[in-house]
Image (cartoon, coloured by chain):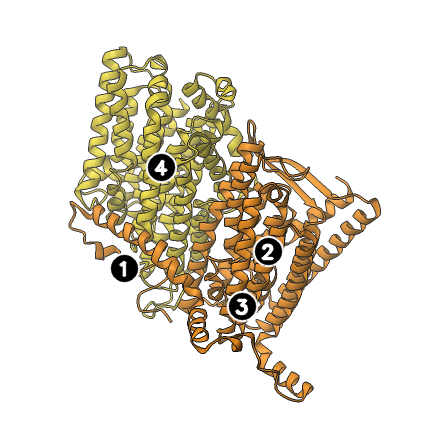
């Protein structure tokens, strides 16, 4: 293993090692002070950033296209292998740099923002786990390893949504988001299985496997399902405003920068397959377009700043999906990077929005123009659109009515079937809807 | 001789406990299971590479019993309970280790005996008693038919001979369905989990006798019949995994919910065993270990919570118990997510193999497994959120988090699932030869499978 490979491994593993160390110390009964935690975090991400810079330098000086670190197979059963390969190439490097830099920034910001918060330690532990999951997903040399990082990002995201665990709403929203994630991740599992079946493996470290057009279409459509779930694309967008229950720094890094773009990364990674699958490309464009329109409409009817920013984020990610669908890879990568930085800044400034707004108003010497595109529409159409946007496109209602409620009805039917022959009444065990704890919904 | 020590030690300890009541049951139980675990570990070390499934299972089960004796709350840790747990350990190890059908049947029946004797472990309704009795009856009949046809009670001697033909095969399948709680016989598991003694019930379920019957008897003895008819059991298993996963979505009784999740995941083991390829079978065998440890941990933690905070816990409202018991909360979260494939735990690898293997053999029906796992993940996270997060309930006095003996026991379980996940080849690699052997029984040879 040469220096570049060792540094790549260090960059990916460092936050994971810190998380493991913190968790072990906590289990042993030791909780580090806020100062120690923020210093450890700062040092970890600063060292990772330096390591990444060195990898970039090595790539630039050697004119190599990628740094690849291979560790054999994590596990193998005959021909079926789970390769442990990390890759830093032109696609993953920007995402790795973005993750390391923004995670360090959020660590620094949160030291003040969450000062004396009871979950301070928990936040930092989860921040490290999230950074590890993201870095693993972005540096993975195979779809199998990408799934591992992908799932870690999902679970940390959900645990941070439920960060303020004394209020029921964040907790219930966390459960809901977890449900959407897991449902969409089925697409990733089945898509990667299909890739294994048709291409003999899920590794892309040495180039994307070749598939026939029909096979590529099937794989890409499954990957699109996973990407749409993670990136809150239509019809799964309903979870994004719910995710705003988490602390602002985590909203910034998850839904302004990294997690929300993980879906775009997955599609960018699968773009050689997308190029072979015009039908899937059209589906990606349609999804992105629908999301962009939905996001801008719903954002305009949002009353609070974090939700508005979330919908603005959604709009941009929708546009990024469109760019990926058209095959504009470099444009999409640049868009992801620019959008992440700007949106993170906006999220972090969200608590000071009124202050910023006043300052801007005094700087320009008056009010901002209130003219909007929707003013051109007839009143009746505007009213209808407003209602539609206010209920966020009825997306949650549609999902509830057509998928979740029927599933619960089936579950209740099974409950009644199980109750046959016993004195136990179904009401003994059931039934308050998951996502709605009894008498506690805010 | 070592096997005899492994089986006899817990039974002797149980007799000692019953004879001299109220004399340190936890210590006697711990020592009995420790001796058993040590003897099983020696057997495992001496076993030839690739033929250590039963020794591994013996070690796992005796360690599980040892952990259970440490985890039993003071309220439950009386002489009859510990004696019952030890009795089940001896019987389970006898069934795991034997090559004789009569001993296997005796082990099968004796493991459930404490649940059938009225004043031992509570059995809340007629369904568990009926299912366990009928499964024993079906197995006894099957063994009778096999003995009449093959004139031997040795598993080795009957291998590949289809003893008793379709009649014996059908009876064995019936025994598996009843004991394992495969649809339509799934309801008794939840009944027993809800109304029975928490930790002993988890031990009974974690014997996985249904899967054992498939791996030790059905596949080696009936390769031809199994090859033709076994997919039916797989479909039943997948249907069960999905049925109970859907059922768990609206269940609010924590015990029933956990039993549904355990059942769904153990049905996945059966589906993996039938997948007819080494990946699926190796995944199923590895998943057997994860499900055993995780569900034991979850049931143990739930019982500790019930003892501390009352037995009226429900998933219909928030209890906010993480504030009182943060270590129990974290352990519950990790065990729960480990059950449904959290990366970094052994189940991520086992489920990866299992789903891959099942999708390979059943490309359409196999999709049921990831769907069921996704639903299970939502259910376990909902239960975690409702028990441990949300507004704290008033009325609880300050309660202790995990006590040192509980903490270290849980830590050992967590280390197993986490280190198993970081270094899965240690477990998956060991199961590979057995997976090949099972696949070879179904396909006569692994090579013929690979040629397909």
**Label 4 crowding class (10 Å Cα cut-off): few <14, some 14-19, many 20+?**
many
Q: Residue at x 59, y 66 (%)?
A: A252
In the rendered structure, which disc, 3 or 2, sits on the residue that comes first in sequence? 3
- Element marked by disc 3: helix
Around disc 1, counting alpha carbons within 10 Å, would you say few (fewer than 14), some (14 to 19), or many (20 or more)? few
Q: Is residue B99 left or right of residue A74?
A: left
Give the chain letter at badge 1.
B
Residue at 55% in and 32% down: A198
Residue A16 can be seen in this image: no
Q: Which chain is orange?
A: A
Q: Earlier in the sequence, mark 1 or mark 4?
A: 4
Looking at the rendered structure, which numbered label has been put on residue A296?
A: 3
Q: Which mark is residue B312?
A: 1
Q: Give the residue pinned by disc 4.
A: B238
Rendered hue of chain B is yellow
Residue A338, image x, y percentages? 68, 63
Q: Position of residue B143 (x, y in %)?
A: 25, 20
């Amino acid at each position: 293993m040469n220096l570049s490979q060792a540094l790549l491994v260090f960059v990916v593993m460092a936050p994971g090692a810190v998380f493991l160390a913190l968790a072990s110390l906590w289990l042993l009964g030791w909780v580090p002070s806020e100062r120690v935690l923020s210093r450890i975090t700062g040092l970890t991400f600063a060292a990772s950033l330096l390591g990444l810079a060195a990898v970039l330098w090595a790539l630039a000086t050697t004119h190599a296209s990628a740094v690849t670190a291979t560790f054999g197979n994590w596990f193998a059963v005959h021909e079926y292998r789970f390769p442990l390969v990390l890759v830093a190439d032109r696609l993953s490097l920007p995402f790795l740099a973005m993750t390391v830099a923004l995670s360090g920034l959020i660590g620094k910001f949160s030291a003040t923002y969450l000062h004396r918060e009871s979950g301070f330690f928990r936040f930092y532990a989860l921040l490290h786990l999230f950074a590890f999951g993201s870095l693993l997903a972005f540096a993975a040399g195979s779809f199998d390893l990408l799934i591992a990082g992908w799932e870690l990002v999902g679970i940390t995201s959900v645990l941070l949504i439920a960060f303020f665990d004394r209020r029921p709403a964040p907790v219930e929203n966390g459960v809901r988001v977890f449900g959407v994630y897991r449902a969409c991740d089925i697409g990733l599992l089945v898509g990667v299985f299909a890739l294994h079946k048709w291409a003999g493996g899920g590794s892309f470290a040495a180039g994307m496997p070749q598939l026939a057009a029909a096979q590529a279409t099937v794989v890409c459509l499954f990957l699109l399902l996973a990407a749409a779930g993670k990136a809150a694309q239509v019809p799964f967008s309903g979870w994004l405003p719910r995710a705003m229950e988490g602390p602002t720094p985590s909203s910034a890094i998850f839904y302004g920068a990294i997690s929300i773009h993980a879906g775009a990364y997955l599609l960018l990674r699968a773009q050689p397959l997308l190029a072979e699958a015009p039908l899937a490309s059209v589906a990606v464009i349609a999804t992105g377009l629908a999301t962009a329109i939905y996001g801008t409409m719903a954002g305009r009817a949002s009353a609070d700043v974090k939700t508005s920013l979330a919908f603005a984020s959604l709009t941009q990610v929708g546009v990024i999906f469109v760019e990926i669908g058209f095959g504009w890879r470099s444009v999409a990568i640049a868009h992801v990077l620019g959008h992440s930085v700007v949106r993170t800044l906006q999220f972090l400034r969200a608590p000071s929005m009124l202050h910023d707004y006043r300052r801007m108003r005094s700087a320009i010497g008056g009010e901002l123009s209130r003219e909007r595109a929707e003013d051109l529409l007839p009143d009746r159409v505007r009213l209808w659109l407003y209602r539609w946007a206010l209920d966020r496109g009825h997306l949650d209602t549609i999902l509830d009515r057509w998928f979740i409620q029927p599933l619960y009805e089936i579950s209740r039917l099974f409950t009644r079937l199980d109750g046959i022959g016993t004195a136990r009444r179904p009401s003994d065990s059931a039934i308050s809807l998951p996502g709605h704890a009894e008498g506690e919904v805010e | 001789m070592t096997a005899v020590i492994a089986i006899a030690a817990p039974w002797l300890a149980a007799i000692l406990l019953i004879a001299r009541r109220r004399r340190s049951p936890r210590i006697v139980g711990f020592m009995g299971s420790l001796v058993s675990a040590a003897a099983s570990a020696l057997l495992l070390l001496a076993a030839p590479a690739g033929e250590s499934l039963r020794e591994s299972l013996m070690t796992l089960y005796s360690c599980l019993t040892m952990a259970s004796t440490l985890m039993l709350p003071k309220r439950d840790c009386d002489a009859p309970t510990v004696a019952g747990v030890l009795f089940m350990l001896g019987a389970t190890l006898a069934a795991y280790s034997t090559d004789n059908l009569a001993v296997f049947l005796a082990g099968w029946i004796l493991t459930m005996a404490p649940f059938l004797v009225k004043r031992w472990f509570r059995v809340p309704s007629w369904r568990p008693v009926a299912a366990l009795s009928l499964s024993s009856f079906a197995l006894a009949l099957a063994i009778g038919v096999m003995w009449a046809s093959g004139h031997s009670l040795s598993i080795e001697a009957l291998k590949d001979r289809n003893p008793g033909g379709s009649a014996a095969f059908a009876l064995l399948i019936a025994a598996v369905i009843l004991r394992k709680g495969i649809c339509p016989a799934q309801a008794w598991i939840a009944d027993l989990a809800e109304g029975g003694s928490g930790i002993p019930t988890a031990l009974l379920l974690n014997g996985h006798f249904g899967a054992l019957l498939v791996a030790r008897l059905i596949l080696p003895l009936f390769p031809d019949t199994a090859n033709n008819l076994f997919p039916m059991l797989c479909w039943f298993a997948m249907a069960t995994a999905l049925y109970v996963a859907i059922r768990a979505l609206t269940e609010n009784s924590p015990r029933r919910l956990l039993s549904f999740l355990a059942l769904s995941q153990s049905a996945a083991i059966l589906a993996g065993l039938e997948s007819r390829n080494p990946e699926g079978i190796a995944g199923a065998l590895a998943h057997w270990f994860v499900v055993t440890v995780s569900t034991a941990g979850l049931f143990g933690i739930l019982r500790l919570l019930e003892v501390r905070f009352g037995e009226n816990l429900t998933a219909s409202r928030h209890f906010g118990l993480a504030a009182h018991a943060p270590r129990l909360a974290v352990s519950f979260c990790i065990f729960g997510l480990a059950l449904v494939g959290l990366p970094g735990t052994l189940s991520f690898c086992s489920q990866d193999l299992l789903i891959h293997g099942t999708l390979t053999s059943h490309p359409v029906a196999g999709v049921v497994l990831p769907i069921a796992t996704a639903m299970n993940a939502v259910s376990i996270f909902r239960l975690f959120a409702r028990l441990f997060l949300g507004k704290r309930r008033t009325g609880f006095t300050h309660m202790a988090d995990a006590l040192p003996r509980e903490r270290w026991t849980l830590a050992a379980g967590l280390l197993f699932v986490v280190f198993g996940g970081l270094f899965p080849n240690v477990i998956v690699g060991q199961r590979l030869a057995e997976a090949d052997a099972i696949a070879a029984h179904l396909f006569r040879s692994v090579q013929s499978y690979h040629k397909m």
